[in-house]
Image: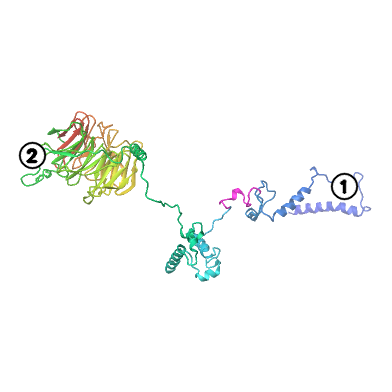
Amino acid sequence: MDLLRAYSDQNDEELNEPEQQNQNPSSTTSSPDASPPRLLPAKSAAPNVDDTMLALTVVDGQRSLSRPIDPTQHIVGFNPTYDQLWAPIYGPSHPYAKDGIAQGMRNHKLGFVEDASIEPFVFDEQYNTFHKYGYAADPSASAGYNYVGDFEALQKNDAVSVYNIPQHEQKKRKIEKRKELEEDEGVDDDMDPEEVQNPASDVWLMKNKKSPWAGKKDGPPTELTEEQKKYAEEYAKKKGEERGGGDKGEVVVEKTTFHGKEERDYQGRSWIAPPRDAKASNDHCYIPKRLVHTWSGHTKGVSAIRFFPNYGHLILSAGMDTKVKIWDVFNTGKCMRTYMGHSKAVRDICFNNDGSKFLTASYDKNIKYWDTETGQVISTFSTGKVPYVVKLNPDEDKQNVLLAGMSDKKIVQWDMNEGKINQEYDQHLGAVNTITFVDNNRRFVTSSDDKSLRVWEFGIPVVIKYISEPHMHSMPSISLHPNSNWLAAQSMDNQILIYSTREKFQLNKKKRFAGHVVAGYACQVNFSPDGRFVMSGDGEGRCWFWDWKTCKVFRTLKCHEGVCIGAAWHPLEQSKVATCGWDGLIKYW
């Protein structure tokens, strides 16, 4: 540190010497080698700049600090402040906007609108109050008790809004409005009677608010001429043809023939009465092995068979020869009655719960409700479309409710007591093939040619579950498992798929029954009464049996020549099965 201090003192002395020499030139002795000091002017390598524009820019920038930024300029020559950036645009500052607001700042058709912290209901209340009474609450007030507008009306109405008018005031105002209307409609005494009668006067217009041409016809209606009547008939006929033959199906005279010995026995019991000793002898079902009986009476193929509910002592068959026959199963094995009432092939049949009545659906667009015992047609239903499936609601208190899946993609619900359609379920994109009730008959599942399953709440035409996958095929036959937890669906890709009837209606991927050939045929799938076996016909005339648990083929029976379209398990005889085919035969195994 001492060395640094000494060095600095030495430099100071050397710097002070020239000053002293200048002050006393006589006292200093200059050396001959020393040169006189010279002062040179300072030079800059930078070119000369005219700073006039810079000064003007600075002045302009200082002036612009007091005004907002013009949104049309693309370059800002100074650093704007926060207040300048967010300052509103006043007046016609924007050359391309009539109201002075740039297009980019618009968020409303009237310009720029900022969000306010006020509820829509409160805003509507104050808005309507202001337009009705002339006052409203001030939204800028913190507590909301300050008002703006007509203070006289505010005091008169006690600051009431349009949404909290007392009830007695509402009644009072209704009465006043009614009186005003009556006064407007009436004619004052001081009015000129001539003006009241003159349609060109305002008084007449006030009294007669309806137009003088409002539907008044003078004299009785004129009758149509013969030419007009002929044209009207041709037009109606043409429209009927365009709609597909009218709203009703073909009219056919119903006939029935009883083939048994007597309709009532010596005790007065009907021929459809079940035997008293008919009951299930065992809960365990077995696969049939041999043919027991063959019923042959249909001249064409048999499309469906149904056992008598709960007893199975009779079997009902629907034929493509337009006839429906019922056969004895327990005793004689003969045809008991033939029902003739359709003009085309019968597509589907369905018993009611006690078997006393049944439904038939035919390609003649008619659905008929028959009395099983007498063969009389109770009622006929038709929408002008072909019914593909008919079903009665299984509930005892809803045996008058008929559901029919039609060819026009609708499920139609009739009340058979009134004979009227009270509901239509219209969501499918193809003809409806099956209707199956699930979940204690609160819901039903339908399948269609649109390769989808839809689940409906009974009585509500809204789909609650829609099942459609790219790999799915059409499912023309569906059967419910005896425990009501599963649905077996006959798929057109030669397999039987299992769906759950729980809330999700999911596909059970672990259960799949295959081996048969049903592509192109609506072969019926069914279960054994104990649920241990799955059964189905196929297109080669065989009846297939699978084990429910293992999904393996248990047995196949060669039943028919051609297609085995229907297969049903006897409700009481555990090892008896009935099949029907397009060869016109019904076989009992």
Q: Is residue 552 left or right of 48 when viewed as pictured? A: left
Q: Amino acid at mark 1?
A: Leu
Q: Decide which of tag 2 and tag 1 comes sooner along the chain.
A: 1
Q: Is residue 552 left or right of 271 when viewed as pictured? A: right
Q: Is residue 263 left or right of 544 when viewed as pictured? A: left
> Mark 2 falls on what kind of element?
loop
Q: Nearer the viewer, residue 481 or 356?
A: 356
Question: Visible in this render: residue 181?
Answer: yes
Location of the C terminus by quadrant is: top left
Q: Position of residue 520 (x, y in %)?
A: 28, 32
Q: Nearer the viewer, residue 304 or 551?
A: 304
Q: Nearer the viewer, residue 247 or 207?
A: 207
Q: Is residue 462 left or right of 251 when viewed as pictured? A: right
Crowd class of label 1 (few under 14; some 14 to 19; many from 20; radius 10 Å): few
Location of the N terminus by quadrant is: bottom right
Q: Position of residue 500 (x, y in %)?
A: 28, 44
Please check the rendered image and state whether residue 347 is part of the magenta-colored stretch, yes or no: no
Picture disc at residue 148: none
Q: Which residue is mark 2?
A: 261
Give residue 315's quadrant in the image: top left
Q: Amino acid at mark 2?
A: Lys
Please check the rendered image and state whether residue 108 is part of the magenta-colored stretch, yes or no: yes
Picture disc at residue 39: 1
Crowd class of label 2 (few under 14; some 14 to 19; many from 20; radius 10 Å): few
Q: Position of residue 317 (x, y in %)?
A: 18, 37
Q: Which region shows up in magenta? A: 95-110
Question: Visible in this render: residue 558?
Answer: no
Q: Position of residue 303 (x, y in %)?
A: 22, 35
